[in-house]
Image (cartoon, rainbow, N blue to C red):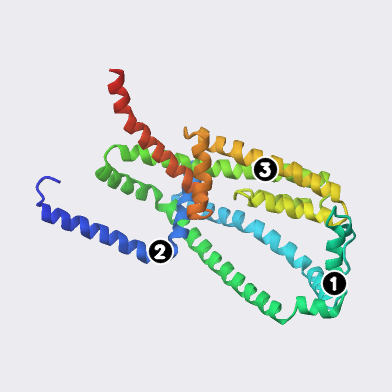
Amino acid sequence: MTSGIPPARWIARATFGVALVLLCIWVLWPFIPALTWAAVLAIATWPLRERIVESGFSSSATGVVLTLCLAVLAALPFALFGAEIARETEAIADVIGQARHGQLEAPAWLSALPIAGSYATDWWHAHFTTPENAGHLLGGSQSARALQLGREAGLWVIRRFVVFGFTLLTLMFLYKDGPHLAADAERLALRIFGSAAKRYGRYGIKAVQATVNGLVFVALGEGLVLALGYIVFRVPHPVLFGAATAVLAIIPFGAPVVLAVASLTLVTASRLAAGFLLFAIGAVLIVIVDHTVRPALIGGSIRLPFFWALLGVFGGLEAFGIVGLFLGPAIMAVALTVWREALEPAETARSA
């Protein structure tokens, strides 16, 4: 109990504080993802923000410039992919039209598949080379389902844009007033948890920065190396595939999807050996990087063992979604710090 405050009044204050926090969470719940992303981005780029401010820029100007730069960096890959999809729309529509009219012939590589080649070719001819079967396969119910999926995808994209907009707005506010907000949060944490709060906060911030750096740099490295592989194996649009690999490699199991699509383009061009070899080499590289290099980079700078760094990355993704990639290692780092400090008195007593 705090001195000078009656127990009943202290309980009432604590109850009111907890209720107020819960109400704030309830009100802000739709914006929690945007607020979390903004906090992660601000922590990861804070050293850059500090250097810009020290060079003479005001905090407001720095916030605007950094926010715009991050917005462009985030939107550029999607603009690139959207333009490429728009260019290929006519070809895709042509293929769908051929399939609807039963004029889509089986590709040459299908019959060359081991064991299942003849069965796959027979199935293709049965479903796509006669107008009746093709019309049934791609008929009205499937079209309605596809239209419904398209609407749901459109709503999902709109929601993501709204979250992205609020993330940028919050990020600009954090760049501008972050030092004051951090100072207030530190004073509150010291008052509630004591001197250990500052140490835990420092470990959490360092863990987020290490995770962002590890994920981003590893993803860029994977994208660069696999882009060279796409060029060597003469995959169509190797730069686009390399950029997609670099973007999706931030997410565990994202890079293999792009690798599989790139390999499939070689298979559809009747280059079976090249497609399977590209996928095998790329898969081995991705497994090694994702399960050794990435956790080592993340855990090395924050004294987080390999196993716990790996659990933090994958467990955070499972628990919180993509933003959990950055929150998971931070939570594990703070938890391990608390664990080590809790064991120190016992170890000191045993040594004495």
> Disc 1, disc 2: CB below 8 Å?
no
Report how far apart the C-alphas of labels 1 and 2 lie in the structure: 52 Å
Identify which residue, 317 or 29, lies in the foreground.
317
Q: x, y (%) of residue 330?
A: 45, 43
Q: Residue at x 81, y 56 (%)?
A: 265
Q: CA distance from mark 1 to mark 3?
A: 38 Å
Q: Residue at x 70, y 40 (%)?
A: 285
Marks 1, 2: nearer the viewer:
1
Q: Position of residue 214 (x, y in %)?
A: 57, 41
Give the residue at mark 1.
Answer: 126
Q: Amino acid at mark 1?
A: Ala
> Residue 160: which quarter of the image?
bottom right
The tally of labels here is 3
Closer to viewer: mark 2 or mark 3: 3
Q: Are marks 2 and 3 in contact (CB under 8 Å)?
A: no
Question: Mark 3 or mark 2, which is nearer the start of the sequence?
Answer: 2
Relative placement, left or right, of 286 versus 89 is left
Q: Which residue is mark 3?
A: 286
Q: Label 2, on which residue? A: 29
Can residue 46 be seen here? The reply is no
What residue do we see at 90% from left, 60% from top?
108
Crowd around label 3: few <14 · some 14–19 · many ≥20 (10 Å): many
Provide residue 180's location: percent of width, then percent of height. 35, 49
Q: Secondary structure at mark 1?
A: helix
Q: Secondary structure at mark 3?
A: helix
Q: Residues within 10 Å of mark 2 (few under 14, many from 20)?
A: few
The residue nearer to you, when weighing 151 against 346, is: 346
Q: Nearer the viewer, residue 132 or 333?
A: 132
Amino acid carrying mark 2 in the image: Trp
